[in-house]
Image (cartoon, rainbow, N blue to C red):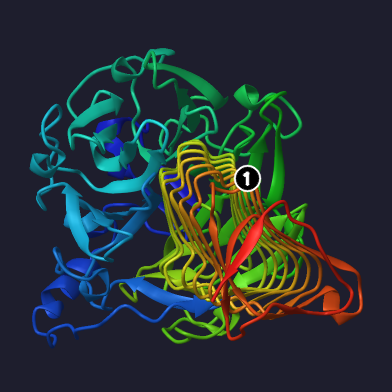
Amino acid sequence: MTLCVSGALLRKERHSFWLTVERKLPNLFQSFPLLPALAFAAMFLPAPLTLHAQAPAPSGTVLTIAGNGFLGFSGDGGPATNASFFDLEGMAVGPDGTLYLSDSSNYRIRAVAPSTGFITTIAGTGDTGADGNGGPATNATLGGVAGLAVDRARNVLYAADFNNSWVRAVNLTNGLLTAFAGVGPNGTGSFAEGPATQTEVLAPASVAVDGAGNVLIADDSEMLVSQVNPVNGVLIYLAGTLFHSGYSGDGGPARSASFASDYWIGADRAGNVFVGDVGSGPLPQGGTRIRRIDAVTRIINTVAGGGTNAPADGPATNALLNLHGMATSDSGTIFVATINQVFQVRDGQMTLYAGNGTNGFTGDGGPALNSEFGNISSIAVAPGGGLLIADYYNGRVRYVVPDSVVLTNDSGQTSFYLPWVSALSGDLALAGNTNLVTVNLGSLISAGGNVTVTGNTSVTSANLGSIISAGGNVTVTGNTSVTNVNLGSLMSAGGNVTITGNTSVTSANLGSVISAGGDVTITGNTSVTNVNLGSLTNAGGNVTLTSNGTNAQVVMNGNVLLGGGTNAATLSVDGTIVLTNSTALNLSSSTRYQSRKWRFRH
């Protein structure tokens, strides 16, 4: 990478430097003269095709979830797959599952609703400017938003308004936009720690929110990483040396380190911070290092990049990275994007996650590893798993279906949707998310591992009605506000089926379950009046339906094989048994009956 600087990198002189790296600055009309010509030429192209959302897909598959492949602006009020964009930059997912997109050179922030897949503008008028703080976000003008981040606990969207030298905040509850950090394009502030709105933030390239709700800002001009407390509005410097461009400091305090160009930032739930430091690799190639700031010691070290090898499976620090995007998961897994591939970094090892290394557009509906991308501009991790990829030249947002979906102890998420997934090779686990209200698994048909929905004490609706099979256990427990458990399509589970302690449930529909590899246990759902097990013919262990609602009605198949037909098993039922397919209850000879009360009704 070559970096030529003329004069101090102050806000009004941001365009006085030129970076010869294969990445884009947020305002593409100013960064690349070719694009106005492309925009002019686009006026003479055929009208965009009308597309429809792609069918949900299994693990490892890539599919388009927004964008019709044309650069421009269109589609608000309709399916996101019919929309067009011009310069997709930041992406973030809100507490209700809404996907937010920075349509930077259209000077808008747009949102895709998880329940309908429709897209709307939630900030920006489409004109460039710096007006509108304190009013409705849709009346404000933006200067080219680079990065986005959501504080899901406070329901606030943060936007790095790069060309306006602000981080701006959109209150997602009332739709108002305010200045959160920086003094804007015409203000004068200090370079000292203090109130964020009185401190210069010259070139905010990306933003992130850590596990405590602090807002992290990567300033590509000041060469600093800042942290803002959203409660008191105080900004402190977390890492970097003001206006000192270069690579130094690994192994020491982050505040004494230097960045060549801190363009991307992320954080995991533990509070560790990750910085994409463009141009910090060894010369002559340059490249990018991913540097990690420890949450406890605040020591900085390189965890990926800085090598001389082409990106490939192996030690992450051996790779020469030309970074086009970076994202981190709650657990600390790092995703890094080159121009047309995405790699995953975990425990120091890099593995290919998506892309075959060829520029283009192919692969939708097939394995992500075989797909082509056309200049990746941003990536983001969806809550629970799955990677969002802004495929810039293809004018699309694409999604890679994960092996497993795991959302645990996340107090920020209020709704969970899974509209793009048909099958998981691993587990589905939603546990301990105390503010989660709605669970809608959309079109999920199967999970190769366990299905666990437990301890989500605010969930009132749990729609698991599309799941047909699970390779392991199916567990729905301790969701004390749920009134209905719908597993009406579930036909088989490789392990146990357990529905317990959902004290508000009035109906448990498992009417399609034919076989379970282990026990079937439905207990302690004290409000249940109806349990449907009318298709169950085979359970590898015991069947227990006790301590549910008073006089609960249990629908059962008259011919049930328990314990695999050879192992000792127990049938325990309280309530009225309504038989299907038989006039008598026919059980294997090894079955033992244990019940305080039951009666038959045909």
Q: Tag 1's secondary structure?
A: loop
In the rendered picture of this protein, how many numbered marks are placed on residues? 1
Percent of width and height locating residue 244: 52, 30
Residue depicted at 23% across the width and 65% down the height:
118
Percent of width and height locating residue 574: 65, 54
Taking 601 as reference, is 279 above or below it?
Answer: above
Taking 202 as reference, is 572 above or below it?
Answer: below
In this view, the residue in front, 481 or 52, is 481
Tell me if 591 is positioned left or right of 23 in this view: right
Residue depicted at 83% across the width and 80% down the height:
588
Residue depicted at 69% across the width and 24% down the height:
253
State the image quarter where residue 492 is shown.
bottom right
State the image quarter where residue 436 is shown.
top left
In this view, the residue in front, 94 or 361, is 94
- The residue indicated by pointer 1 is 524
In this view, the residue in front, 556 or 467, is 556
Q: Quadrant of the C terminus?
A: bottom right
Residue depicted at 23% across the width and 66% down the height:
85
Mark 1: few, some, or many residues within 10 Å (few <14, many ≥20)?
A: many
Taking 53 as reference, is 211 above or below it?
Answer: above
In this view, the residue in front, 83 or 602, is 602
Residue 522 shows in this picture: yes
Percent of width and height locating residue 389: 45, 65
State the image quarter where residue 196 is shown.
top left
Residue 165 shows in this picture: no
Percent of width and height locating residue 535: 59, 79
Tell me if 332 is positioned left or right of 457 in this view: right
Q: Amino acid at mark 1?
A: Gly
